[in-house]
C-alpha cells in the first residue's frame, strides 16, 4: 500500500499561494493531456472501424481491433500502479506516453488486420498506464492540507475529460475518415502526445516516494492468459476454427489450467492481484458478475452500431458519430443523476435493478432496428440503451466499496472494474462471432442462385462491404437486410445475459451506506480499464469531500446539532480554529482561506454576542464558556468522523486510516491535533 506525502507548510503569503496554485494547475493541465489521449482512443476508433476493415479486409476480425486494446490495457493496469509506486510515477507516466505513441504510429502505418491488431495491443499497454498513473499522480500533486480544497475540482475535471471524449471520439473518428484518412485516427495522437511529453518534462514536479512491492507477475500473467484464451475461443470458435478443432480444445485446456494455476498462485502471493477472499463477500461477487455483463453489453453494442449506421443506413462516418450521441448522453446523464440521488437519499439498490431492466428494453429496441427505421425513433432507442447502462455504472463500485473491509477497499474497487473490463473484451469478441455467423448465413440465403458482378461473391461481401454498391438494386436491398439482421440479432442474443444480471441485481443486499462512501467519480465508472488505488487513496477520495466548502458547512452543521447548541456552522468552525491557534483575526483568516467576509463576519459576531469569544485588539480569543463549549464540539467532531467511517473505525483500525484522520483534521482547519481517540493509540 502506498504511503502519502507529508503535509507541507502553508504558503508564506498571497503571492506565493497564487504561484503555487498556478504551478499546480499547469501540472494538472499537462496530466490531462495524457489522460485525454487514452480516453479519446477508446472511443475515436469506433466510427472508423467499418472503413478500416473495408480497406484492410477481414470484417470477421473487426472485434479484435477493440478487444486487443482492452485486453492489453486491462492486463497491464495492476503492474503500472505498483511499478509507479516503486520507481516514481513521473518516469512511468512518460514511459506510458512513449509506448502509446509508438503503438499509435504503428497502427497508422498498418497494412493488414493482423498488424493493426498487434499494434493496438501495444497501444493498449500504454493507454492503460496513462489512465492508472494520471489518477495516482493527483494525490502526489496536492499536499494533504489542500487535498479537500481541490478534490471536487479534480473530480469534475476528470469527469469532464471522460465525458468530452465519449462525445468527441465518435465525431472526430468520423471526421477524419470523411476528410482525411482513417489512419489519422491514430496519427492525431502523435502531436498531442509529443506536446504532452514536453510539458510534463518541464512542469510536472512530484515527490518520489519509493514504496517496495512484491509484484504479482505470475498472477497478472495467468489471469491475462485465461482472459485472452477465453476471448479467442469466443471470437474464433465456430468461425475460423470449428468448435471441436484441436486449436479450440487446446485453448480450453490452457484456460482451465491457467485458472487452476491462478488460484494456487493467489493463495500464496504476498500482494495478490485479485485476493481470493474477496469472493467470499456476497456483494462483491454479485456486483462483479453484473459488472461483467454490463461491460459485455456496453462495448459490444458500441462496437457494432457504427457498422449498422454506415453500411446499412449508408450514413457518413461523421454522421454515424452524431447518431451515437443520444446513447452517450443517456449514459452520462443517467450515471450522473443516479450518483447524485444516491448521495442525497442513501438508497442505491433500485438503480442496478432498474438499470439492467432498462438495458434489456434497450437491447430489444436495438434488435428492432431496420433499414427504414426513422432517425428520431432510432436515436430514442440509442438513448434508452445508454440510460440503462448509465444507471448501473455508478452503483456497482459504490456497493462494493460499502460492503468490504477497509483493508480490501482499494483492491475491491479495482476488482469490480477489472471484471467490467474483461466483460467488455469478451462482449466485443462474442458479438463479433455472432455477427460473422449470422452474416454468412444471411448472405448465402440472399444471394443463392443470383447472378453477381465480376469480383463479387459471398466471401468478398463478408470481408468488404464496399462491394454492396456494385450490386443491382434488388440484390443490394437483400444484402443490406442481411447485414441489418446480422447486427441486430447480436443485440437479441445479449438479452438473456442481461436478464441474468437483472436477477443478480435483485439478489444484492442493500446495506446502509457508510457516511464516508460517496458516489464514485467518472474515473471509476466511464473508462473500460480498471482503476487501481490503495485503500488509503479510496478513503481519502471520499472523505476529502468534507474539505470542500459545502462539505465543511454540512459537517459543522451536524457537529453543532450533535452538541445541542444553536450556532452557525461557520461559528462552530471558527471556535475550533481559535482552539487550535489560541487567537485568530477573522478578516485576515477569511482572506487567507478565501472565505467570504459575509460568512466570517456573522460567525465572529455571534461568538462575541453569546460570550463565547472576546476581542483582543483585532483578534478573537475564547472565553471560559467558549473553551468549555469547544471541548464539547471537539468531542462531537470525533463522534462525527467515527460515524462517517462506520465499522472501518473499529478497535483494529489500521495505522494508515488513523493517519488519514489526522490529515483530514488538518484539512478541515481544526489544526494538526488528531481526535482524542486517535491520540490514545
Image: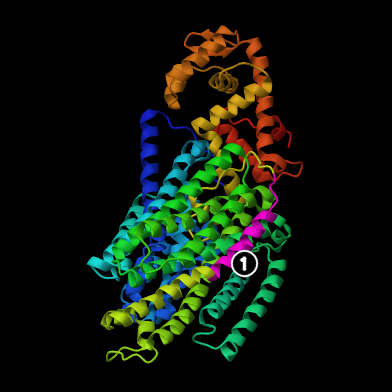
Q: Is 176 within the magenta?
A: no
Classify mark 1: residues with Cα within 10 Å, few (<14), some (14-19) or many (20+): some
Q: Using residue 616 as the reference point, say whether residue 478 is left or right of it.
A: left
Examine the image and state in which quarter residue 375 appears.
bottom left
Q: Is 501 within the magenta?
A: yes
Q: Nearer the viewer, residue 670 or 566?
A: 566
Percent x, y for residue 652? 75, 44
Q: Using residue 581 as the reference point, say whether residue 266 is left or right of it.
A: right
As displayed, is residue 575 above or below residue 118? Answer: above
Pick the quarter of the image with the C terminus.
Answer: top right
Percent x, y for residue 181? 26, 70
Percent x, y for residue 38? 41, 60
Evaluate whether residue 36 shows in this view: no
Q: Main secondary structure of the magenta part?
A: helix
As displayed, is residue 406 above or below residue 436? Answer: above
| Magenta range | 493-511
As displayed, is residue 67 above or below residue 583? Answer: below
* Mark 1, secondary structure of its residue: loop
Extreme residue toward the left, this view:
179
Identity of the residue drawn at 39% across and 50% down: 204
Q: Using residue 190 as the reference point, say whether residue 610 is left or right of it.
A: right
Identity of the residue drawn at 23% across and 68% down: 180
Identity of the residue drawn at 49% across and 71% down: 490
Q: Nearer the viewer, residue 303 or 133?
A: 303
According to the picture, the residue beneath numbered tag 1 turns out to be 216
The image shows a total of numbered marks equal to: 1
Q: Nearer the viewer, residue 600 or 426?
A: 426
Amino acid at each position: 500500500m502506498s504511503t502519502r506525502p507529508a503535509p507541507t507548510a502553508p504558503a508564506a503569503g498571497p503571492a506565493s499561494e497564487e504561484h503555487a496554485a498556478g504551478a499546480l494547475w499547469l501540472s494538472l493541465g499537462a496530466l490531462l493531456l495524457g489522460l485525454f489521449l487514452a480516453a479519446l482512443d477508446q472511443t475515436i476508433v469506433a466510427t472508423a472501424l467499418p472503413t478500416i476493415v473495408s480497406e484492410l479486409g477481414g470484417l470477421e476480425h473487426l472485434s479484435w481491433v477493440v478487444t486487443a486494446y482492452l485486453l492489453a490495457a486491462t492486463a497491464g493496469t495492476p503492474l503500472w500502479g505498483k511499478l509507479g509506486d516503486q520507481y516514481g510515477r513521473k518516469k512511468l507516466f512518460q514511459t506510458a506516453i512513449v509506448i502509446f505513441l509508438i503503438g499509435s504510429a504503428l497502427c497508422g502505418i498498418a497494412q493488414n488486420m493482423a498488424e493493426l491488431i498487434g499494434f493496438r495491443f501495444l497501444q493498449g499497454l500504454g493507454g492503460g498506464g496513462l489512465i492508472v498513473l494520471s489518477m495516482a499522480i493527483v494525490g502526489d500533486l496536492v499536499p494533504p492540507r489542500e487535498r479537500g480544497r481541490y478534490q471536487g475540482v479534480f473530480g469534475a475535471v476528470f469527469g469532464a475529460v471522460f465525458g468530452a471524449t465519449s462525445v468527441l471520439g465518435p465525431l472526430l473518428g468520423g471526421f477524419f475518415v470523411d476528410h482525411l484518412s482513417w489512419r489519422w485516427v491514430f496519427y492525431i495522437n502523435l502531436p498531442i502526445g509529443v506536446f504532452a511529453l514536453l510539458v510534463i518534462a518541464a512542469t510536472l514536479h512530484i515527490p518520489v516516494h519509493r514504496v517496495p512491492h512484491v509484484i504479482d507477475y505470475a498472477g497478472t500473467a495467468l489471469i491475462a492468459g485465461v482472459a485472452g484464451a477465453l476471448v479467442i475461443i469466443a471470437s474464433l470458435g465456430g468461425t475460423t476454427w470449428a468448435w471441436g478443432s484441436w486449436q479450440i480444445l487446446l485453448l480450453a485446456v490452457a484456460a482451465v489450467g491457467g485458472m487452476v494455476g491462478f488460484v494456487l498462485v493467489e493463495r500464496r502471493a504476498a500482494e495478490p492481484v485479485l485476493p481470493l477472499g474477496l469472493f467470499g463477500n456476497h456483494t462483491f461477487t454479485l456486483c462483479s458478475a453484473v459488472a461483467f455483463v454490463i461491460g459485455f453489453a456496453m462495448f459490444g453494442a458500441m462496437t457494432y452500431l457504427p457498422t449498422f449506421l454506415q453500411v446499412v443506413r449508408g450514413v457518413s462516418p461523421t454522421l454515424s458519430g452524431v447518431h451515437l450521441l443520444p446513447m452517450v448522453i443517456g449514459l452520462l446523464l443517467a450515471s450522473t443523476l443516479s450518483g447524485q440521488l444516491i448521495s442525497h437519499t442513501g438508497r442505491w439498490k433500485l438503480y442496478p435493478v432498474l438499470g439492467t431492466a432498462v438495458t434489456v428494453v434497450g437491447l430489444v429496441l436495438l434488435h428492432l432496428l431496420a433499414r427504414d427505421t426513422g432517425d428520431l425513433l432510432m436515436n430514442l432507442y440509442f438513448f434508452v440503451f445508454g440510460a440503462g447502462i448509465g444507471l448501473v455504472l455508478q452503483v456497482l463500485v459504490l456497493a462494493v466499496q460499502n460492503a468490504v473491509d477497509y483493508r480490501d477497499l482499494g483492491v475491491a474497487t479495482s476488482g469490480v472494474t477489472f471484471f467490467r473490463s474483461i466483460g467488455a473484451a469478451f462482449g466485443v469478441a462474442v458479438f463479433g462471432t455472432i455477427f460473422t455467423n449470422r452474416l454468412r448465413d444471411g448472405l448465402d440465403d440472399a444471394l443463392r442462385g443470383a447472378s453477381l458482378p465480376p469480383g463479387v461473391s459471398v466471401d468478398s461481401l463478408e470481408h468488404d462491404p464496399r462491394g454492396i454498391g456494385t450490386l443491382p438494386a434488388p440484390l443490394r436491398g437483400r444484402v443490406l437486410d442481411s447485414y441489418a439482421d446480422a447486427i441486430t440479432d447480436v443485440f437479441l442474443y445479449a438479452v438473456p445475459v442481461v436478464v441474468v444480471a437483472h436477477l443478480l441485481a435483485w439478489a444484492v443486499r442493500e446495506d446502509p451506506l457508510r457516511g464516508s462512501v460517496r458516489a464514485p467519480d467518472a474515473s471509476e465508472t466511464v473508462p473500460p480499464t480498471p482503476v487501481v488505488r490503495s485503500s488509503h487513496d479510496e478513503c481519502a477520495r471520499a472523505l476529502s469531500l468534507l474539505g470542500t466548502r459545502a462539505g465543511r458547512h454540512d459537517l459543522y452543521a451536524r457537529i453543532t446539532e450533535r452538541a445541542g447548541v444553536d450556532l452557525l456552522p461557520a461559528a462552530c468552525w471558527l471556535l475550533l480554529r481559535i482552539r487550535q491557534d489560541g487567537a485568530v483575526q477573522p478578516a485576515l483568516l477569511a482572506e487567507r482561506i478565501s472565505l467570504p467576509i459575509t460568512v466570517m463576519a456573522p460567525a465572529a459576531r455571534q461568538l462575541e454576542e453569546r460570550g463565547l469569544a472576546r476581542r483582543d485588539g483585532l483578534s478573537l480569543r475564547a472565553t471560559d464558556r467558549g473553551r468549555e463549549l469547544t471541548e464539547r464540539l471537539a468531542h462531537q467532531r470525533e463522534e462525527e468522523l467515527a460515524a462517517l467511517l462506520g465499522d472501518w473505525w473499529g478497535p483494529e483500525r489500521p495505522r494508515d486510516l488513523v493517519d488519514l484522520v489526522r490529515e483530514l483534521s488538518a484539512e478541515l482547519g481544526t489544526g494538526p491535533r488528531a481526535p482524542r481517540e486517535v491520540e490514545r493509540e
